[in-house]
Image: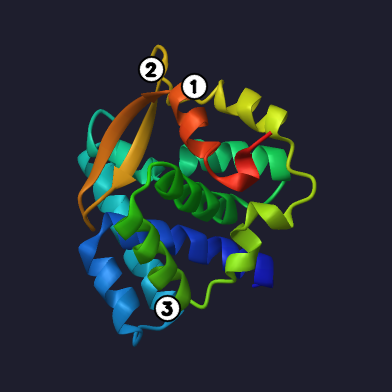
Amino acid sequence: LPSQDMLSGKGEIIKYGFLSSEINELIHKGNLPLEDLVLKCAHYKQEVVNRDPFEQGERIHLNLGHTLGHALEFTLRIPHGLAVAMGIKYLFQGLELKESVKEFERLAKKLDFDQEKIDLANYARFDRQDFWATMAHDKKRQENDLKLIVVEEIGKPTIRPMPLNQLRHRLETITVFKG
């Protein structure tokens, strides 16, 4: 695969490393070929979808990183998995989930993930106004709240509803999001 596709796939693997303690452990052991790790992630996703085909429960957890990720994907015109990884990174930073931020960095290192590619400071074309406009139309929005998926303990994602203006306030504590 082209390097951009490999990077995008690794971004999705990072997501599964937060959602599944088994996948997290496999990443940290580092002895499983990437292809097998991808299959483990696909199997995990299929099990979740089979248990919750209409996204009435746990399936929403698969959206970890997607709220910010979709807006970053659209605004920066970058591959989906790369945007998801960025979404996870900046969500955890903005919510000050310090242990989750550290775990993100550990997973990225184990997967040999080029972290420069998920640093917004490296994207001169980042249009904050477009980003926030896209965030305002997130499909997972419920009334005034975004349904943010957070992981403070590996394998135990939770939903944290948050108004967009509160998320914006938190993200704007990060230099690259300041206007």
SS for tag 2? loop
The residue pinned by badge 1 equals 165
Question: CA–CA distance between discs 2 and 3?
Answer: 36 Å
Residues at discs 1 and 2 in contact (Cβ within 8 Å): no
Q: Position of residue 77 (x, y in %)?
A: 72, 45
Give SS at disc 1: helix
Q: Quadrant of the C terminus?
A: top right
What percent of the width, then of the height, locates residue 71? 60, 36
Which secondary structure, mark 3?
helix
Residue 80's place in the image compared with 132, above or below, is below
Instruction: Please tell me in which quadrant of the rendered image residue 146 appears.
Output: top left
Residue named by callout 3 = 110
Q: Which class describes the residues within 10 Å of circle 3: few (<14), some (14-19), or many (20+)? A: some
Determine whether 125 is above or below 112 in the image.
above
**Residue at 41% over, 83% down:** 33
CA distance separating discs 1 and 2: 14 Å
**Residue at mark 2:** 142
Amino acid type at mark 3:
Lys
